[in-house]
């Protein structure tokens, strides 16, 4: 398996529909130390595993109108910045992600289909939307208006920071007509968490389903 490392603070523009693949037989590793990868297209795919590592100084920006899809067949490692910045495009990651950096829905859509682990954060602002398709231990931080969509609501164990009047959290796997807040715990003091438990009592379910949102009190 081959390995490619990007460094020097440069830029790799995928343009419109560019692709980066691993070797079909042996896979490969792409490490971005401190460059910026931008545009739209694909990273991974074509039936070949590709280990994608974005280090602390690296930026991967879905900046094109057609979106950037990442499907490497391996856990993506991000210590730097993944972002979606074009409102007509977006960033979609099919793989599990270990994130100790930032994944930013900056006025655009980010869709994470796999589990999200690590101590990093998902940031939302500028009217962007972040969709978490599986369990997540990352915090979610609103830096302005935006929406968080949870497809596995009970799997979010990270805190939610900066939630305000212009923000929304959609528990997409809960039936709205049968969902209610069943418990609120916390003092509301600055620097603490308020735990909000919601329960879906849809009669079509074998049993009621609950999820707890951990809201960080800033003031």
Image (tube, rainbow, N blue to C red):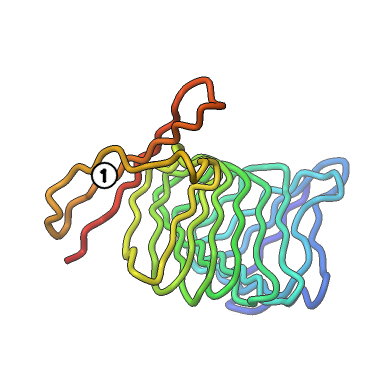
Residue named by callout 1: 195
Q: Does 108 appear above or below 209?
A: below
x then y, percent, for residue 84: 60, 70
Indicate left or right for 95 with 158 as reference.
Answer: right
Front residue of this view, candidates 75 and 56: 75
Q: Image point 45% across, 64% down: which residue?
A: 123
Which residue is situated farthest in the top direction here? 206
Q: Does 153 appear above or below 215?
A: above
Q: Does 176 appear above or below 205?
A: below
x then y, percent, for residue 139: 38, 53
x then y, percent, for residue 177: 49, 43
x then y, percent, for residue 216: 26, 56
For mark 1, give the secondary structure.
strand
Choose top left, top right, bottom left or bottom right for residue 164. Answer: bottom left
Q: Image point 64% across, 76% down: which residue?
A: 87
For the C terminus, the image quarter is bottom left
Indicate left or right for 81 with 86 as reference.
Answer: left
Indicate left or right for 61 with 1 as reference.
Answer: left
Choose top left, top right, bottom left or bottom right for residue 43. Answer: bottom right
Q: Does 59 appear above or below 53?
A: below
Front residue of this view, candidates 76 and 23: 76
Q: Image point 50% across, 63% down: which residue?
A: 80
């Amino acid at each position: 398996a081959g390995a490619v490392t990007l460094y020097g603070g440069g830029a790799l523009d995928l343009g419109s529909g560019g692709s980066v693949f691993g070797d079909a037989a042996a896979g490969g590793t792409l490490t971005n130390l401190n460059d910026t990868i931008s545009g739209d297209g694909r990273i991974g795919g074509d039936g070949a595993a590709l280990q994608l590592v974005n280090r602390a100084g690296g930026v991967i920006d879905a900046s094109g109108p057609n979106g950037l899809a990442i499907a490497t067949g391996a856990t993506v490692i991000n210590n730097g910045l993944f972002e979606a910045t074009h409102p007509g495009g977006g960033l979609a990651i099919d793989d599990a992600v270990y994130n100790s950096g930032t994944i930013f829905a900056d006025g655009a859509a980010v869709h994470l289909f796999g589990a999200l682990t690590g101590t990093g954060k998902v940031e939302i602002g500028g009217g962007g939307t972040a969709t978490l398709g599986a369990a997540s231990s990352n915090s979610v931080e609103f830096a302005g208006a935006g929406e968080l969509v949870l497809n596995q609501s009970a799997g979010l164990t990270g805190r939610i920071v900066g939630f305000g009047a212009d923000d929304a959290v959609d528990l997409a796997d809960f039936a709205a007509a049968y969902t209610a807040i069943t418990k609120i715990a916390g003092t509301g003091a600055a620097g603490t968490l308020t735990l909000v438990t919601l329960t879906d009592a849809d009669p079509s379910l074998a049993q009621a389903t609950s999820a707890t949102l951990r809201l960080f009190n800033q003031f």
